[in-house]
Image: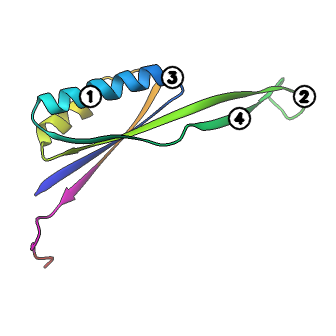
Amino acid sequence: MAFVTKLSFQSGDREVLESLVTDLKEMVERKGAQCKGPHSSPPERLTVPQYRTLGPGEQFDPWEYTSYSRRLEIHGSDEVARRVGHMDFPESVHVEIEVDRKKPLGHRTE
């Protein structure tokens, strides 16, 4: 059975995110695996309230920032996907890894 590894990245630092995704895609392709992406979503503008004390009451101006996201898929190379899964990523990038098992066409479900 083939595996598809889906990688999702989010960061407020667009340059670090772009560099990471580009380097990963080049490494995956250099190792001979098929890589789909990077796919990007529109930037998301987030607002976080900031309170002057631990309890409710006076507030500072809200903290606003933009979050960027990218997605990659690695098809057909378990070793490359395993290597990517054990990499150290920058602290400014949130990474989610999802592994799907794909059955070949005509495979019985019994």
Element type at mark 4: strand
Which label is found at residue 82? Answer: none
* Residue 80 % position (x, y): 15, 35
Nearest to N terminus: mark 3 or mark 2: 3
Residue under label 3, please give it.
13
Nearest to N terminus: mark 4 or mark 3: 3
Residues at circles 4 and 3 in contact by the CB criterion of under 8 Å: no
Which numbered mark, 2 or 1, is in the foreground of this view?
1
Q: Is residue 71 above or below residue 55?
A: below
Name the residue rendered at 25%, 31% in the picture: 25
Residue under label 1, please give it.
24
Name the residue rendered at 12%, 37% in the picture: 79
Residue under label 4, please give it.
47
Residue under label 2, please give it.
58
| 11 sits left or right of 79 in the view | right
Nearest to N terminus: mark 2 or mark 4: 4
Name the residue rendered at 36%, 21% in the picture: 19
The answer for how far apart the CA atoms under marks 3 and 1 are is 17 Å
The answer for how far apart the CA atoms under marks 2 and 1 are is 45 Å
Q: Amino acid type of disc 1?
A: Leu
Q: Amino acid type of disc 3?
A: Asp
Q: How many marks?
A: 4
Nearest to N terminus: mark 1 or mark 4: 1
In the rendered image, residue 106 lying in the magenta stretch gets the answer yes
Identify the image quadrant of the N terminus: bottom left
Q: Residues within 10 Å of mark 3 (few under 14, many from 20)?
A: some
In depth, the one of 15 and 7 nearer the eye is 15
* Residue 56 % position (x, y): 86, 35
Q: Can see residue 86?
A: no
